[in-house]
Image (cartoon, rainbow, N blue to C red):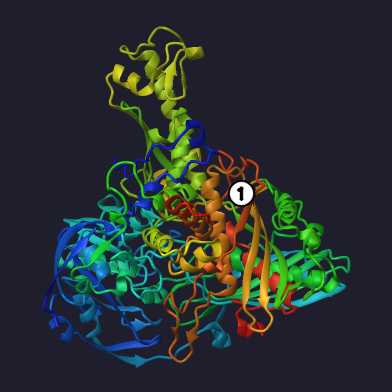
Amino acid sequence: MTTDVTTTFTLNGREVTLHAEPRVTLLDALRDRLDSPGAKKGCDHGQCGACTVHVDGERVLSCLTLAAQMEGRAVTTIEGLSPAEGEVLHAVQQAFLAEDAFQCGYCTPGQIMSAVACIREGHAGSDAEIREWMSGNICRCGAYNAITAAVRRAAVTLQGEPA
Amino acid sequence: MTITTAPRKLGLASDSQLGGRPPRFEGAMKTRGAVPFAYDQPVAGLAHGVLVGATVAAGRVAAIDTAAAEAAPGVIAVHTRAGLPALKGAHDFLGNPPADPVFHALSDDITFFGQPIGLVVAETFEQATEAARLVRVTYEAGDLRPEMALAPPEARLPLAAMDRAVGEAEAVLADCEVQLDLEYRLPREYQMPIELNGLTAAWDGDRLTLWEPNQWLDGAARSYSEWFGIPFENVRVISPYIGGGFGSKGFAQGFGALVAQSARILGRPVRMVLTRAQIFQLIGGRTATWQRLQIGADRSGLLRAIVQDAESEAPMVGMWAEGTSGVTQIMYRYDAYAARQRAVRVNATCPGAKRAPGANPSAYGIECAIDELAHEIGMDPLQIRLLNYAERDPFSGNAWSTRELRAAFEQGAERFGWSGRSLAPRSMRDGRELIGWGVAAGAFPVLRAAGEARVELHADGTVAVSSSSTDMGQGAYTVVAQTAAELFGVGIDRVRVGLGDSVLPRAGVTGGSRMAMTMTGATWKAGQALIDELKSLAMTDPASPFAGRSNAVEVAEGRISLPGGEAAMEIGAFLTAIGRESLGVTRDTLAEAKQRPEDAWANWTTASRALPPAEGDFARYSWCAHFVEVRVDEDFGTVRVSRVVSAFDCGRLFSPLMAESQFKGGVIMGIGQALLEEGIVDPRIGRVMNDNLGDYLLPVNADIPEIEVISVGRPDYEASVLGGKGVGEVGIVGVAPAIANAVFHATGKRVRTLPITMDRLL
């Protein structure tokens, strides 16, 4: 039942070792035990997307992922997307700022992690495609038009391809 | 003072002043996931709470067996009604004294499903979650009344305060050439911000600190101080960023009292965050409403009488009424109007405010009904609205402060291409898709309230503004920063803003679209007083370079100078010259006659002091007109919104970029209301069955087309000091009827119950 397991993985480029019960989700581990509260809990059921992080470069719902599964994997959260200090934002972060692609900002870390992956996956070829592939991330404030525009803008920056 | 947000450099000073379009002030931090939401705040020694909710909706807890839970690993405490001392009763949000001097954070009398009956506290969230499942409860069943439709006559209570009468409406109706008798139903809908409700509570002696996402810190601080019998000043509520509210985070709630009580008993901080399912069960959304509208008109389309009969769901304990007449009574000219409403007690949590409370269901009824009238007499739906345009408020008789609704109709129609619409239903199609165009208007009252702000100038050249007002995404930081930038003529990069901490200057609720009006006014007043003080110091301080040189100085572009700009120096350098680190002024906007402590108290900690829209000589509202295209799959009955143009009169827009985001957000929430959102009650157990985001559907990106928003407003100085009107609420008002009207135009079928799902359409 409650024997801790030890898991070693890379978090935002830094090796971390976690001692925790096997039932601890990646989301709760990040937030409560690894000082990385950027990923957000909105449903704990994989329905809202606020907890989206990257595992080995793929977008993953961290609330439906156990931390103990991360042995040897590379986890990237919003905190690891751009340097913590200074003015430099990732192209997707810059695009979200430029388009005002958020209001409250709570779903934003998940939206941005999804957007980075969406572009990398090649799913940002048209507005319709962006809307479809960004639909796992709910924005209750209703910034969808701007989110779509931000992904389109960032895709051009990152890939030089027409959106 | 706490200054929580400092922006990046953001371009030209002129872009950052009122009316400019600077990027969201805290936007860069939000893209980094670096703004501290309530549960992101590290708290040492934290214990984790999980709420235990009743699994019946009516009855009594007969017994609770907590032995297994208490024995589970990591469990610190299992709180139940029996083990908890009583707290003190607190005033309600309107300032009414408590009916009972004693308040229990838990009750064994169950009136709704999920009602808190216990709190498990453990070392970790996982341990608390497991232990909460081990609590065994037996109930004595009570009589269940699951929802409004199933309630008997005696459950229906007249609400005299909601009665409305202008003229003899029923007599006028009886005389009308055209009479329509229509019924409209809205289901329970929920706010569902993505940030969950909850809190962290920590005590230090008899001082309580709460990290709680809350739209009204002074109101919450008052509730906690009264519950625990400690001074108001001993409660600190910290909520610098709220992950969406939409009305769901307006008050301190019973679960908050429970968590604070647990923290006090255990002597360590406790965090408890509701699960999404618990939010559906505990946090009151917009309650279900039913309304019957009888409308009478001439064959020419002139509206003569409206008779409205309405019901809304209310809880078994306490009272809440969702208004249904607020827009009905003002939108169109009429000869006579009558309305009455009843509350129907059901076994559900106390409803609450969801975006545009009252105005939203009211507009749904009248904006569908006038569309039905247009169809009845064969008139264009936009034409009938212009024919019945209210040149003054038909309800109060007052002149409008400003009402650019005609411009909203005209410019919205122009952008949408409304003139290309065919009159007959089911007359436009694209292959298998039926196309429909609909229009509807919306309004929300301007609620004027006082605010307080502190403005400081610092020797490092920055301007700092602070208030306990809150930002839940509507753009408070940005609007306040723009006001400060304009006051001193500096770039927004020189401004710091601190919000969302109850130790800062006072503020009433951030709700009802009053924040920007209140905070621009308070910041402006404090800033003007600060400029006066700065000038006075410049002329009188012995160390001032301006002393004795002139009887006037000027403040512009961040500098202070002699008249004409001579001898100008940076304000920061001037402060250094006179040996000051900073200079600050705090001002409130309470009326002269409302400065007594009890008035100030009522203004900050109750909702009783906002002025109604038709107070005095004018009627003050924000207005909008929505034009919508839908595409309905003829075989499957699926409805897609394919185009939206919405025109708004919200007076002067202080921050057009923030306002446009709010407008679009309101439209999108309206699309959800029209097509997706419905709390479905299991009548056997009184539970909202679809209590999760996979079954209660919110709009996702793929549901939403490009939305065009237009501002047609002009400054309204009867509404607010700097000419703005409310922005956040009005966007949703009228969206659902515009979609319902478009669906009728597409299909010829009138669906009068929301949401318009395929089963209702086929």
* Image-based side of B556 in relation to B397, left or right: left
Quarter of the image where one finds residue A138: bottom left
Vertical placement of residue B67 versus B702, above or below: below
Residue at image position (42%, 45%) is B477
**What is the quadrant of the C terminus of chain B in the image?**
bottom right
Vertical placement of residue B757 versus B384, above or below: below
Residue at image position (56%, 42%) is B720
Quarter of the image where one finds residue B122: bottom left
Task: Using the rendered image of the protein, determine whether residue B711 is visible from the camera's viewpoint.
Answer: yes
The picture places residue B746, in percent across and down from the top left corner, at 73, 74
The picture places residue B382, in percent across and down from the top left corner, at 77, 61
Label 1 packing within 10 angstroms: few (<14), some (14-19), many (20+): many
* Image-based side of B251 in relation to B698, left or right: left
Front one among A160 and B614: A160
**What is the quadrant of the N terminus of chain B in the image?**
top left
Give the structural element (helix, strand or loop) at label 1. Answer: loop
Task: Using the rendered image of the protein, determine whether residue B590 is visible from the camera's viewpoint.
Answer: no
Figure label count:
1
Residue type at tag 1: Cys
Q: What residue does disc 1 label?
A: B650
Front one among B395 and B429: B429
Chain hosting mark 1: B
The picture places residue A75, in percent across and down from the top left corner, at 26, 63
